[in-house]
Image: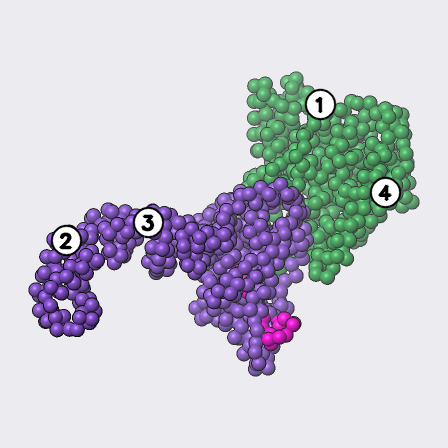
């Protein structure tokens, strides 16, 4: 049962093969039995899950069920969930019980989804390995000595280890696509503004975007159907009709033009990853697509630009964690300054503090033009690069990551090496474009991902392309050994 | 040495929107602490601002009223600093692209001279909460009801050269924002606050001296005192061979002096950058024209109309037109009494005196314009004298009721029955033989003055109710008959 996709589980529920309560209980039991190996959940919400499942079963019996009713899934612990700890994997919010629901959480509740719990992540979504979590690193089910990627590492590990059929994630610089690639699952970062950010704890407001992490493109479409839409509580969400993302999945790919940016296939790319990527492209050619080389000349600038803009926004976004109203407060502060310094000094982890410092520095008087403004200029160049290429091709493809999953601890002492892992994913966030990662093979027994990039609001096209690939290949159905 | 002061002002006007600038919470004054602070105002993790367009409309109104450039594209920026009553750790404001650009107003000084004062800019921002230091021993309380209240910060050019000019400027801005209905103007409640930038230089110098900023002064009188004191302090300092330090000072109304709050060296680096959670506000001519069409009568136009329509003196017209509520009150009284001069005298005299004595503003006057108009009507039709009217007014203020009701209940109706008046006059003459003797023996041209004594006696005997004109005539006739 645990290898079933959301689509298959939905059919089983509809056909009465099992109830939502049975399905939910089975997953809860499996989490209890298995998650000690992966540390993919921070909080398991057994009671609420069973209550939601019971309500879902009633709706199914009454014939009022929707497409998502009764389906279990997990939320990244960055989405505020009313009455449930919402920690963002930080000591700072270890004691924070959210008094309200994020819009995404509301939408899943309204759709009849069953939340199994809250998944592990890098602290405040800052990281590419899940190692900055206050709750310890989540482990890659393909090799538990390896990282699952980050920041949505817990969500990716939970889906790969079949502890949840699907999970939500958020992506600021690759935080959905990179762990999806490293854990051999499907991940979609929608267009900026497609999914509401309200109640999603902000890392970098102009880059953050929530999205689905699933076994298949079809499941991602089902998730996005629930998640997407304008939200009056999020001024940056876009008031634009939400299509049925499952509607175009079966369109043939005849005539599809794929752009391969030469900058994504440079010398430092792992040769086996390059091979798997090329093999995947061959599959698309078999499906009727044509391929052309394109150029995104400013790709190399995306990392430095990102590491100005994201920390700048983060340094301000994280100012609210001051020990005054909620969250961690230091013991016996002697005065206000002491309260601030120690609450923040003790409450935040090293990576979060590093980025706050970088961001505060970049915004400080006298440096603003040299750093922040310059980074914004680069951001426009990157956006223009993409606009030019996407006027010539339907989708852009390349590897999701330059390497497969690395060993826990391997890159923790070298932050820049860690940052470089996001080289292929970061530029999309700067441009605001949608992108997916789908499994396209393994390297030394570790999965690797193909990234598919589309134009603004072209999620339907991406899902169609990914689904056709998954009909033609079986990389996405492969599981880690022992699962 | 002749010194010259240079003064520039920053006025914070709370905009009279029903809800806050970035949340749906109410802005009403005086509620229990923290009962008007929602999740957004508390800066709970994940919350996002949504701009209240009513604040935009109000800001544009102000811009049009001071003949300013309106920002077609204005942008919210974050001003980052830590303070317990600033929940997000930043204030959302407009630094780089304010909604209102360069404009000007004309002020009139007491000697009648006019002067044009430049308005540099006016921008939208959110107010902070309040720290309460006296209620909890050893601790500070935070009340976030005010957090997020919309403010329009109006910045003047350093065009003023005396405290008198500064006060005239503040009064004029006060008059404009209250006339526009965009601010209640209540200085005691902090709806309208002023920071004064003051420097001095030798007359004829081009360069500005070092300035100080005196913060949050909350009455016209205090503005005058604070500036006068600060000018004197700086001149004394310079004449003693010292120098002025750039710093922020606080005005202590009890001691009538300013004192240092923080120096420039201690000033924050606010790390301003555009708020990524809010879109730029883009407005076009159609929008601006629509706002222009909705502008109410402005103080200058109203003053001209009062002179023309009610034949008021320049001074009376200025005073009565300055505040919208006061102007409307006056017009209602003038129409009811059909005597504008009488109405002006009462509104500026008796009513203002009572408002001042009771520390009340016109909007909260217990005597309505209709009530006062009714009272003046009774003076006009000789039902009561002006003197009795003051008694009626006092009753009206304390106990309410219409003029007719009070006159009736207290038996204050003027005696005009000539028989009754003649009887009182006869009694007075009979009981004042010494004075009658003097009257008869006096030179005929001195007798006019002496009649005052008899008037007083008659009025006293009638408890002030006898019609003074009638009494005068009867007295003269009867006394002269004795000569």
Q: Chain B, which colour?
A: purple
Question: Which residue in the protein does label 1 denote?
Answer: A8
- Residue at 65%, 59% (x, y): give it: B270
* Dot label at residue B337: 3
Indicate the position of residue A166 as horizontal and vertical percent values: 70, 32
Separation of residues labelled 1 and 4 (CA atoms)? 39 Å
Q: Is residue A389 visible?
A: yes
Q: Nearer the viewer, mark 1 or mark 4?
A: 4
How crowded pointer 1 is (Cα within 10 Å; few <14, some 14-19, many 20+) is rated as few
Residue under mark 3: which chain is it in? B
Q: Are marks 1 and 4 in contact (CB under 8 Å)?
A: no
Q: Nearer the viewer, mark 2 or mark 1?
A: 2
Q: Are marks 2 and 3 on the same chain?
A: yes
Q: Is B258 left, or right, of A41 in this rendering?
A: left
| Disc 2 to disc 1, C-alpha distance | 108 Å
Secondary structure found at label 1? helix
Q: Residues within 10 Å of mark 4 (few under 14, many from 20)?
A: many
Q: Nearer the viewer, mark 3 or mark 1?
A: 3
Badge nearest the viewer, 4 or 3: 3
| Whether marks 1 and 4 lie on the same chain | yes
> Split into 4 quadrants, where in the image is the C terminus of chain A?
top right
Give the letter of the chain under mark 4: A
């Amino acid at each position: 049962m645990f290898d079933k996709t959301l689509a298959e589980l939905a059919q089983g529920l509809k056909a009465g093969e099992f109830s939502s309560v049975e399905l939910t209980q089975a997953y809860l039991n499996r989490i209890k039995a298995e998650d000690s190996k992966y540390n993919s959940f921070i909080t398991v919400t057994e009671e609420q899950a069973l209550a939601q499942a019971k309500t879902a079963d009633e709706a199914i019996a009454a014939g009022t069920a929707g497409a998502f009713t009764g389906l279990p899934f997990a939320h990244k612990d960055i989405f505020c969930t009313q009455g449930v700890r919402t920690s963002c994997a930080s000591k700072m919010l270890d004691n924070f019980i959210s008094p309200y629901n994020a819009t995404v959480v509301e939408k899943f509740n309204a759709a009849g989804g069953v939340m199994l719990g809250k998944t592990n992540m890098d602290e405040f979504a800052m990281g590419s390995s899940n190692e900055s979590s206050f709750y310890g690193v989540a482990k890659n089910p393909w090799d538990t000595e390896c990282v699952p990627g980050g920041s949505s590492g817990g969500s990716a590990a939970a889906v790969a280890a079949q502890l949840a059929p699907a999970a939500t994630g958020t992506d600021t610089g690759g935080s959905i696509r990179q762990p999806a690639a490293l854990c051999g699952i499907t991940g979609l970062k929608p267009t900026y503004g497609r999914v509401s950010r309200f109640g999603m704890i902000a890392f970098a407001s102009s880059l953050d975007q929530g999205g689905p992490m699933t076994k298949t493109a079809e499941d991602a479409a089902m998730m996005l159907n629930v998640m997407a839409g304008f939200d009056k509580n999020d001024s940056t969400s876009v008031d634009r009709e939400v299509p049925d993302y499952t509607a175009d999945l079966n369109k043939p790919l005849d005539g599809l033009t794929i752009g391969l940016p030469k900058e994504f296939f440079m010398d430092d790319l792992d040769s086996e990853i390059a091979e798997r990527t090329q093999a995947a492209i061959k599959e698309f050619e078999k499906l009727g697509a044509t391929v052309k080389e394109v150029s995104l000349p400013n790709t190399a600038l995306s990392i430095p630009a990102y590491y100005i803009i994201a920390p700048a926004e983060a340094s301000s976004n994280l100012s609210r964690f001051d020990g005054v109203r909620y969250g961690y407060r230091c013991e016996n502060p002697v005065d206000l300054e002491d309260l601030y310094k120690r609450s923040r000094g003790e409450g935040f982890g090293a990576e979060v503090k590093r980025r706050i410092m970088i961001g505060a520095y970049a915004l400080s008087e006298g440096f603003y033009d040299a750093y922040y403004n310059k980074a914004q200029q680069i951001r426009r160049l990157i956006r223009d690069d993409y606009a030019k290429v996407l006027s010539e091709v339907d989708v852009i493809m390349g590897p999701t990551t330059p390497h497969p999953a690395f060993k826990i601890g391997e890159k923790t002492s070298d932050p820049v090496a860690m940052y470089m892992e996001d080289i292929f994913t970061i530029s999309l966030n700067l441009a605001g474009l949608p992108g997916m990662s789908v499994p396209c093979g393994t390297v030394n027994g570790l999965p690797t991902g193909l990234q598919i990039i589309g134009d603004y609001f072209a999620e339907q096209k991406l899902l169609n392309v990914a689904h056709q690939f998954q009909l033609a290949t079986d990389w996405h159905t492969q599981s880690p050994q022992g699962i | 040495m002749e010194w010259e002061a240079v003064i520039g002002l920053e006025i914070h006007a709370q905009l009279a929107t029903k809800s806050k600038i970035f949340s749906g919470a109410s802005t009403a004054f005086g509620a229990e602490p923290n009962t008007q602070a929602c999740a957004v105002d508390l800066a709970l993790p994940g919350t996002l601002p949504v701009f209240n367009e009513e604040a935009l409309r109000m800001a544009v109104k102000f811009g049009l009223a001071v003949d300013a450039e309106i920002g077609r594209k204005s942008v919210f920026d974050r001003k980052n600093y830590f303070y317990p009553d600033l929940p997000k750790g930043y204030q959302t404001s407009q630094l780089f692209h304010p909604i209102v650009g360069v404009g000007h107003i004309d002020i009139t000084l007491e000697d009648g001279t006019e002067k044009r004062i430049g308005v540099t800019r006016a921008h939208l921002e959110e107010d902070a909460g309040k720290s309460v230091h006296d209620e909890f021993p050893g601790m500070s309380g935070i009340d976030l009801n005010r957090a997020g209240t919309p403010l329009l910060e109006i910045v003047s050019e350093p065009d003023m050269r005396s405290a008198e000019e500064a006060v005239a400027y503040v009064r004029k801005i006060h008059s404009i924002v209250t006339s526009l209905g965009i601010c209640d103007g209540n200085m005691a409640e902090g709806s309208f606050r002023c920071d004064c930038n003051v420097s001095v230089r030798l007359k004829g110098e081009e360069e500005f001296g070092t300035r100080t900023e005196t913060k949050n002064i909350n009455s016209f009188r205090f503005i005058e005192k604070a500036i006068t004191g600060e000018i004197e302090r700086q001149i004394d300092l310079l004449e003693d061979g010292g120098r002025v330090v750039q710093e922020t000072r606080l005005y202590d109304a009890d001691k009538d002096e300013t004192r240092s709050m923080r120096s420039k060296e201690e000033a924050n680096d606010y790390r301003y950058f555009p708020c990524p959670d809010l879109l730029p506000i883009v407005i076009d001519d159609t929008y601006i024209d629509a706002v222009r069409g909705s502008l109410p009568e402005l103080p200058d136009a109203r003053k001209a109309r009062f002179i023309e329509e009610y034949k008021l003196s320049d001074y009376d017209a200025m005073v009565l037109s300055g505040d919208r509520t006061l102007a409307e009150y006056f017009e209602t009284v003038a129409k009811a009494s059909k005597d504008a001069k009488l109405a002006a005298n009462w509104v500026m005299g008796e009513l203002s005196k009572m408002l001042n004595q009771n520390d009340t503003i016109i909007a909260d006057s217990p005597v309505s314009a209709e009530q006062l108009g009714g009272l003046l009507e009774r003076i006009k039709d000789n039902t009561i004298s002006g003197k009795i009217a003051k008694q009626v007014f006092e009753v009206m203020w304390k106990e309410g009721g219409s003029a007719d009701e009070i006159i009736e209940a207290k038996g204050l109706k003027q005696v005009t029955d000539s028989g009754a008046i003649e009887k009182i006059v006869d009694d007075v003459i009979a009981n004042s033989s010494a004075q009658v003797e003097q009257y008869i023996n006096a030179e005929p041209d001195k007798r006019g003055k002496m009649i005052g004594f008899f008037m007083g006696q008659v009025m006293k005997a009638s408890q002030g109710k006898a019609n003074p004109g009638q009494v005068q005539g009867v007295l003269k006739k009867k006394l002269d008959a004795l000569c």
